[in-house]
Image: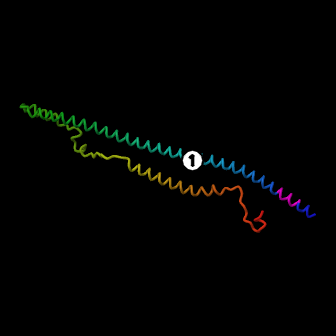
Amino acid sequence: SELKEKQMKSQQRIQEKQKKVQELKQAVNTIKLSAQTAVEDSERIFTELISSMEKKRSEVTELIRAQEKAELSRAERLLEQLEQEIADLQRRLTELEQLSHTHDHIQFLQALASGRRSPPYERPDFQTSSISVHQHLSFDEMKNSLLNLKKTLEEFSEEEFDIISPHVAAVQIFSLPEPQSREDFLE
């Protein structure tokens, strides 16, 4: 009878172990599927982040190019205007020099009267000479802002990784119970 009891206990332990084997195999399959899903989710999320950053990079590039185009256009218009003013002033100077050599006073007065209409650059409200030209132009402030953004994102990523890492490590197939007795320890 004691033998029967030991056989039954052994049979019962075998069944328990077989049940554990099945549970463990299911857990192995589950963790494989879960890990694959987690990898795919991670890849998708990082791809979306990269895409978002590339979009912002493109937007910043467009901003820079638009500002460059606008400023070059303004500069070109001002250059044309200044060159026209120079040509008009040189023409006027030539006329005045010619008039200074004339001895016909009537022609002199007529020439002066015809030149009374002042070109726009001679009017007091229009002063291209008061325009300040900035020689040391750069987008350094924008670059500094981007460097700050990069640093902030890197720091944030590190902080989030420190939070994510323990969550990954917490995924365990099984945990061993603390032995309560000598027999438990020996099992």
Among the 4 quarters of the image, the one containing residue 164: bottom right
Residue 182 is a magenta residue: no
Which residue in the protein does label 1 denote?
Answer: 46
Of all residues shown, which one is farthest toward the right? 1
- Foreground: 93 or 16? 16
| Labels in figure, total | 1
> In the displayed structure, does residue 67 sit left or right of residue 7?
left
Residue 133: image x %, image y %?
A: 28, 45
> In the displayed structure, does residue 92 sit left or right of residue 180?
left
Q: Going 20% across and 38% down the picture, which residue do you hit?
A: 118
Among the 4 quarters of the image, the one containing residue 44: top right
- Foreground: 117 or 81? 81
Residue 112: image x %, image y %?
A: 13, 35
**Main SS category, magenta section:** helix
Give the extent of the magenta segment.
Answer: 7-15
Q: Residues within 10 Å of mark 1 (few under 14, many from 20)?
A: few
